[in-house]
Image (cartoon, coloured by chain):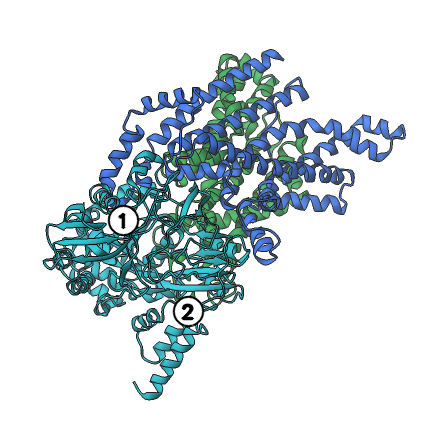
Chain colours: A green, B blue, C cyan
Amino acid sequence: MSVEQVVHVPSGHEPARRLREALTLLFANKLASIGALLAAAFVVVGVAGSVIVLVPGLDHLYTDQNLRAALLPPLAPDHVLGTDHLGRDLAWRVVTGSGISLMFGVAVTAISMAIGMVVGSIAGYYGGIADRLLSGAIDFTWGFPVILLAVVLGGMLSPGLLVVGIAVASVTWAGFARMIRAEAISLHEKEFVEAARALGVSGPRIIVRHLLPNMLGSTLVLGTYYVAAAIIVEASLSFIGLGAQPPMPSLGQLIATGRNFLSVDPWVAVVPGTAMALIVLGLNTFGDGLRDVFDPRLRRW
Amino acid sequence: MIRFVLSRGIRAALIFVVASVAVCYGLRVAPGSLADIVTNPLNRAFAVKDLEERLGLDEPVIVQYFVFVRNIMGGDFGVSFISNRSVTEIIATGGLNTLKLGGAAAILTYFISVPLGIMAAARRNSVIDQGSMLIAVLGMAIPNFFLAILLVRLFAVELRWLPAAGQGGIKHLILPAVVLAAEAIAINLRLVRASVLEQLSRDYIRTLRAKGASERRVVWIHAFRNALPPVITFGGVMLRTLLGYTLVVEVIFRYPGLGFELVDSVLKRDYAVAQALALVFIAGVVLFNFLADLGHHLAEPRIRERGAAG
Amino acid sequence: MTQTEESELRDTIEQYRNARLTRRDFVQRAAVLGISASVAASILAACGGGGGGGGTTTGEEGQPVQGGVLRMGYDRAFQKLDNVVGPWADEPFTAIYEVPIIRDPGGKFVSSVAEAWEFSSDGLTLSMKIREGLKFHSGAPLTAANVAEDFNIFRTTGVTANFWAPVKNVEEGENNSVVLTLSKTNYGLIETISTLFQSIHNEASRKAAGEGWGATTVDATGPFTLKTFKPASEVVVERWPDYPGSGVPFVTNKGPAYLDSIRWVPILEPANRANEIETGSVDIVKSPAAQDISRLQSNDDLVVLELQELSNYFITIDRTRGALGQPGVAQAMSHAIDRQALVDTVFFGHAVPTYGPIFPAYRWYDPGVEAYNEYDPDKARDLLKSAGLSELRFTLLTQNQPIQVQVLEAVGGMLREVGITMEVKAVEDAAFFPDMFAGKPDAFMFKWLWESPTDNMRFFGRVPSWDYNGNPPKSMAGIDAWESAATEEQLEKACRQVQLAWAEELPFIPLVTQSLVWVHHKRVHNFRPTQTSIYPLFNDVWIEA
């Protein structure tokens, strides 16, 4: 989704100027631009990692082991970030782990975003009984502890990425729905929507053509936070044995394995741990910057 | 008001029933069985059948559910299939421990984030402000389990100031409480700061200042009081999040609270314990939801909808 | 070996004994002198345990002090302490129960609850004289009738009921004795009778306790009684003041135990075990992570004891499944595995490679197994080629435990070198066991832990089935020989026969045996694990106030 689409405003503003404004605002905020750079860097890393995971024949990068060169510190020859307990290249493992974690975060967030959009806009646009039913579901689900759900689900199904994904998506959709419902209610009264309605445009069409494009900004902001949250939840669960199951090298798994070697070679845990913190930091500050851009009312946060 | 409480109460009860069915059913159709945990692989074939008959696990799930509900109504949560301890006792001891830990984390959260947030807002861009924003940024970025291993390494293994894990006195509470609170401190800090900042830009503050009210009074009494509603509203969310994270933190610190027992019973398929504890947690969530709604209702009668960001 | 070499070896052993050398250093130095790792290991075993930084002090350690709580860090989650159908015999077993016969540190069977035993000349009757004056925790007297009753439970519904198959009848004999009548000779029964799942208990109390047996109630004869059983967080036992005394010759304290109580806590994360003994939240810890051992050895407050665990990691592949069943495939996999590298890397030297199904410190270990399964990737490739396979891919199921996963990751990398792709699926126990026993996975990994090593082959040969394991004729013949041995000599011969056959046919592929490492604080005295038991006895242990 391009930035242009995001700032699409039907009320006559010139998109190019808005975009320039947005970028200026984004980069005026020092923290946000650092975040944007960090997030961008990790998006590159994550894409590289995803390619490694998805393209067959590249797995040797992170699985090739050399037991004679185990637990090397960073800056060892051929291994920028050193090696893990089996002599596998830590840099490639962290790249792969970031890829898995980011893919997981983005996929889960995209799914919950889609569900949230449908539910939220229906509830907000139509109101009435539909709203009361859906709002009830949203209110209960929103803020439900994901980890609790994942643990219980992990007991019902076999623990793994899929279960964590289901748990995260079954909660975060409500966050999107809640926000979109509120926005839909306020947009509902806006002139351009009323105009469309007067022209006899159907409900679903108004939602798709007019409401959703106007919410993309704030949805994206929320999405950024949720990607970070999903990554953390997955890693936390991996850490207590209920997330990604070994030997899948998600960042949480890498930290969980690495912590066993903290006394001999702290880097094995510290490198993926730092990567994770940076990804989350990047996403959060990027999100803050985006919010300042799209939602000036909230700039104070 | 009464109508509000009543309608939310009915909704909570409804949710609870749905959740109990889901939990009870879900845990029983789970792959793997208790029998494989509590009997020896060496004589499994014999023992599994025997055990399932004795525990009534060979009954249809629906029958097991109603047996469960009937027992709960009678105040009987059953006994653990593994330890033979009464589930009520597990809930009581574990619940007390979790309350201690959660309480410590909540106290830590507010005692750090509120004063620091106000100070940061009062002296914008000062060292305090920047320092507290750094704490906020780090607190949100560093996952709590990673923070846990770093703190254990530093304060337990290297400095020997605090125990690495387990349960005992106050000392055993410090590390898990700090880890549990870290994220909440970060979020609250930002929230308090932003909220106070917004109040400080309002007209009434200018009036107060013009009237010669002391700056301290303006910030700590007037601005803060009006900045409270979002902090209170967020409190409900925060408590729910803390509740979720107790599962992870208690496991990491081998702290025998409800979260620890729940993870353990889920992994061991100890249904009686797992379903009761899951329900206790869900009850907690429902209760916190209700309290948050109530707080929100009281703080701002005209319910303001806002994005869930943060 | 020249004279200088010999004296150097003696020196080296002396240094090791005096704990100036770690086990690893010892093996390395021995290698310089041209001694194979297994011989070195058996020397180590003969030295009576292993060396560590703190050394193994087996002599008298001052005057025992009565009282105190011993805090133990355990490496597993506790299971019901149920000696009849329990899933696992955990460490508190040796504190609260006693077995009829026990292995002394040299592996010889000696008295415990039974003071003497004897096979008839035709080998078809085993009579066992029970010690006089014994009683249960509840105060009820223990007589031969109780033991006979227990044996009848064990052989019909107990964990090891299969191993009791040759026993036709058990009854009380004259003079406080128990008489077992066998349908065929089976000297190996003694091996089974000396395992923890044949611990003696009061059957009347067990019946009364129902589900509570092993959790809320244990009525047995050990020096401690069960106080608290919270399997996820703690198990506490208390001294039994009326303990009539131990019948075990190598236990020196013949009265009630010195310790007031013992409190176990499960510490499941390997790295935390070292942390917790260093920070003093426990007095003894079992199996710290291998990478932490050298750090613990250099700690002056701690004593590190190292033995070979009565266990073995192994991989079983489904021979009924196409390519995996081709002749030579199991051998190819075995040759592709560099066991020494596993020992060095995953276990940081605190393990031994196993080329056969039994670890080298066992008294009947046959070094002949070392001729098979040596690391030889070229041979592995050749074997695969002659099996007509250019590529092999399968999924292996394992328990989700850190060490298991690390071993498998390393093995996976080694197999990849010869063109075998092994995908690992790690699941929690509740999902692992049903699948394993149903023979669902292409392959699985497990670690047996048991005091009678040959029993493991008798058992895991049949898990999930002999068919799954390829019906190996020589191994099966060896098991038969073990199961019908009439004398100790025949038993030993059968044991060696099974080992060699197993190493050749590989019904399961042995990998490594890890060290059993105990770390205790110096204020703990007389803590003496032996090479022949899974857990130590606690009656002699005392702790400085």
Q: As shown in the figure, which amino acid type bears the numbered disc 2?
A: Gly
Q: Chain of mark 2?
A: C
Q: Nearer the viewer, residue A279 or C518?
A: C518
Relative horizontal placement of residue C469, taking residue A298 as reference (left or right): left
Q: Nearer the viewer, residue A193 or C208?
A: C208
Identify the residue under disc 1: C198
Relative horizontal placement of residue C504, taking residue C267 as reference (left or right): left
**C62 is higher (above) or lower (below) than C319:** below
Q: Earlier in the sequence, mark 1 or mark 2?
A: 2
Q: As shown in the figure, which amino acid type bears the numbered disc 1?
A: Gln
**B58 is higher (above) or lower (below) than C312:** above
The residue positioned 51% from the left and 20% from the top of the image is B12
Q: Quadrant of residue C383?
A: bottom left
Q: Chain of mark 1?
A: C
Q: Tell me the crowding category of disc 1: few under 14, some 14 to 19, or many 20 or more residues within 10 angstroms, Cα based.
A: many
Q: Nearer the viewer, residue A191 or C319?
A: C319
* Picture disc at residue C51: 2
The residue positioned 42% from the left and 50% from the top of the image is A249
**A203 is higher (above) or lower (below) than C218:** above
Relative horizontal placement of residue A186, taking residue A233 as reference (left or right): right
Under circle 1, the secondary element is: helix
* Picture disc at residue B47: none
Q: Quadrant of residue C289?
A: bottom left
